[in-house]
Amino acid sequence: MSENIELWKKFLATMIPTLGVADSSVARKGMEETLALLDPDFVCPAAFSIWSGHDGFVKMGETFREAWIHHGSSHEFFDLGDGRILIIIEPTFESKATGETITHKMIEIVTFRDGKITEIVPYYWDTVPLVEAGGGVVEAPWLEAKR
């Protein structure tokens, strides 16, 4: 297995447990271990924003925890070379707003430099179930025109 995939697995092992931790001291210790794996100039364009740096990553996690409960994920890893990996992920989330639980598919392309994660770019198969489960309204006028 590639060095970058191993680094990503270490990242998951430190980051995912912090998603649902109520004890802030335990969450902080896990987050410190996670941030040590991220480049200080880390970037993640996701969730209608561009999260950058360690502070941005922490804020992204807080935003996620406010909206979702993570119930696990499956991962399939591919080393793309040039310091990048691709991960096919099937996470299961429960919406705190609606109580609805969904499993969906997504891909993340992760870039590494000098043993640190520099960028995570997520791509969602279908965002509609996420928006609906989160209590949002999905408007698709182009679909209405076809009915």
Image: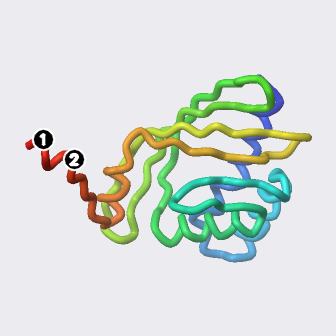
Which quadrant, please, contains the C terminus?
Answer: top left
Instruction: Please tell me how crowded label 2 is: few (under 14), some (14-19), or many (20+) other residues with Cα within 10 Å.
Output: few
26 or 127: nearer the eye? 127
9 vs 14: above or below: above
Q: Is mark 2 on a helix, strand or loop?
A: helix
Whether residue 30 is visible to the viewer of this picture, yes or no, is: no
Residue 135 placement, left or right of 120? left
Crowd rating for badge 1 (residues with CA inside 10 Å; few <14, some 14–19, many 20+): few
The residue singled out by tag 1 in the image is 146
Q: Is mark 1 on a helix, strand or loop?
A: helix
Image location of residue 93, percent across then percent down: 43, 54
Marks 1 and 2 sit apart, C-alpha to C-alpha, by: 7 Å
Q: Are marks 1 and 2 in contact (CB under 8 Å)?
A: yes
Could you tell me which residue is drawn at 79 percent across and 67 percent down? Answer: 29
Q: Which residue lies furthest to the right in this view?
A: 114
**Which amino acid type corresponds to the residue marked 1 in the rendered image?**
Lys
At 83% from the left and 30% from the top, the residue drawn is 3
Residue corresponding to mark 2: 142
Report if residue 12 is visible in the image.
Answer: yes
On screen, residue 121 versus residue 111, left or right, reads left
